[in-house]
Amino acid sequence: MDNHTSPVKIAALGMEQRTYSTLQLFFHEHCKDSYVLVEENSADISIIDMDGFQARRMLEEHKKHYPNQPSILISLSHDKAHDAVYIRKPIMLEALSSALLKAKERLQQSTIKAPTLKTPTVETTPQLQMTATPPETAAPLLRNNNNVAHNHDSHKTAGQEKSSSKHFNQYRYSANFLTEDADLEQINTKLAENFNPDNPIQTAKFQYQPEQTLQGYFQQAYFTALQTQQNVLLKGVWRPITILHKSKQLRVEKNFRHLYALSGMLFDKSDVSITILDNSVDCEPRLHETVLPAEPFLWKLAMRTSRGRVPADTNFTAPIKLIRWPNFTRTIITPHALRIAALWAKQPTSLMDTASYLSVPLQHVFIFYTAAVSLNFVTPVMTEKNHAAAALPPANRHRYRKIFQNLLERLRNN
Amino acid sequence: MTNYKIIFTGPVGAGKTTAISSICDRPPLSTDKIASDMTRDVKKTTTVACDYGTVRLSGGDCLHLYGTPGQERFDFMWDILTSGGIGLVLLLDNTRANPFQDMDFFLEQFQDFINQTQIAIGVTQMDRKSVPCIDDYHNHLSKQGLTIPIFDVDARKRQDVSLLIKALLFSLDPGLIENND
């Protein structure tokens, strides 16, 4: 392997689509294509997500077939069970870069020690193959590994253009694609079943700091644009995003889908800039750009960043009031969103009580709250002493509930 | 068999007839006439009595969808139409000169009915004229202390109309259960 000319081949195992896309983007933009994603049987290094279902089994299988291949394990916990490089989630750019360098050093050492090492043939179970090969963008990449290394960018562009047009349609006709969002389906709602809001360890697990995420920076840029009535330019490791204050839209590259893939990453302030533009600056989209409505974009970004968590300053027991309804015909309807919105519009209710009253998973309430609070659609109701207002008894059952249920069922079936 | 009804109202050309058509079981009975006054500038026919469609429900129940005539001169019908209704869907045409004025007018006209039930608002024609935006409608309503579901809708799309009705139903009873909401 020549470090200067050939990219290091990386297998990403047990990764969902979003993480996979994030890695692709990271390798392409941050590492200048010095790493490339390939299938497991042709990889030099593997990166394994240890938080997935059957991750341990996958790791064992992997170690059995590729005992000398350096691995990078990513996980929420810090498990030192294997001789591997660990990165703790959330993954910081620097941590990933340094882990890759470490793994690369180990690869070079093992190559020196065992120069005749053969690439084993792997027979994985269909389930493991599926886990290791994310859908859509992964498919064209994995069909021809030679093309991956040399035409990586063209493959990515083609795949993403297709995705972007699909996503644009989602903005217009979002009502039925919500259950199709893989992120929502992957959330393990059982994790919060015994959640105790008074337990700081548990609350920390379900909270995150949006400030250093793309969501946080976009939020800041968006509200700056609205407050100053000026267009705003947001720059970072992603391609520039221009927020158009008047139309509440953003001008972004056509392949904007990868931005959602960045939702799980933290960015240092020094890598991000928010610039207020002179309104006379031409903001017409260029050939490679498109214009999107800002609210559904931020909603989706927050929803993805949340992944069943809430911003760090959230009070779990303060009643939440709906200030305005999301435009649900053009925004992703998170699970039980209509019910939660209706409840909070009718009667402010805490996150905990909402889950209990509506009999819905707490994390679904968290997702809706996080998306809604990112756009200031909801607010906690506090008393004068800055304490959570007392919770009210749940709203009454309507006398026509049975007929309403009937009608809902009918609307769903048609 | 029990009958229930939802009222669709709004100014002329807002899409009431179309919305009812997109949701009911069979083409609605419509009492449109060739427009002979200023309405003609907006569309060739206008509803002079009411639109009517039905949605059959399991258990033999039936939901009736009534559309009010768009022209104000037929407002004597409104009380009759709303009697026994379970909720109101207000459709607004974003291309009209002053859609806020329309909204205020209908909210005032149906105030008693809304107080007793609930309302959901759909703004049509936003693809032809994007201003005012949905946010502007909310800002206007918040000055009156109202938090109402307002969606950008295409009255031809069943999904959009269906979502308006769902929002209305959940506003009436958030405790309703739906598997795929």
Image (cartoon, coloured by chain):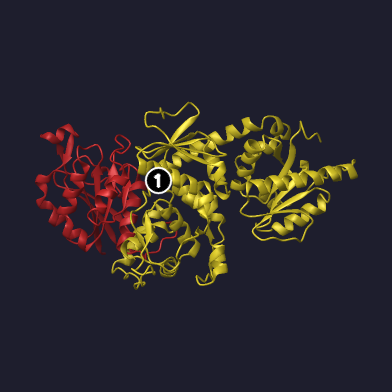
Q: Position of residue A91 (x, y in %)?
A: 63, 51
Asked whether, in this view, residue B53 is left or right of residue A382, the answer is left
Asked whether, in this view, residue A239 is left or right of residue B154, the answer is right
Image point 69% across, 57% down: which residue?
A55
Seen from the viewer's position, the closer of residues A298 and B41 is A298
Seen from the viewer's position, the closer of residues A214 and A335 is A214
Q: Residue A57 appears in which quarter of the rendering?
A: bottom right
Q: Position of residue A275 (x, y in %)?
A: 46, 37
Number of marks drawn: 1
Asked whether, in this view, residue A65 is left or right of residue A273, the answer is right
Q: Position of residue A12 (x, y in %)?
A: 69, 46
**Picture quarter with the N terminus of chain A:** top right
Q: Which residue is mark 1?
A: A223
**Is residue A406 among the parts visible in the rendering?**
no
Q: Chain of mark 1?
A: A
Q: Report the amino acid beneath label 1.
A: Phe
> Badge 1: how crowded within 10 Å, few (<14), some, or many (20+)?
some
Image point 55% across, 64% down: which residue?
A204
Position of residue A80 relative to residue A251, above or below, is: below
Q: Position of residue B158 (x, y in %)?
A: 35, 46
Q: Residue A121 appears in which quarter of the rendering?
A: top right
**Is residue B143 among the parts visible in the rendering?**
yes
Q: Residue furthest front?
A: A270
For the colour yellow, the matching chain is: A
Numbered disc 1: secondary structure = helix
Image point 13% across, 56% down: which residue?
B79
For the colour red, the matching chain is: B
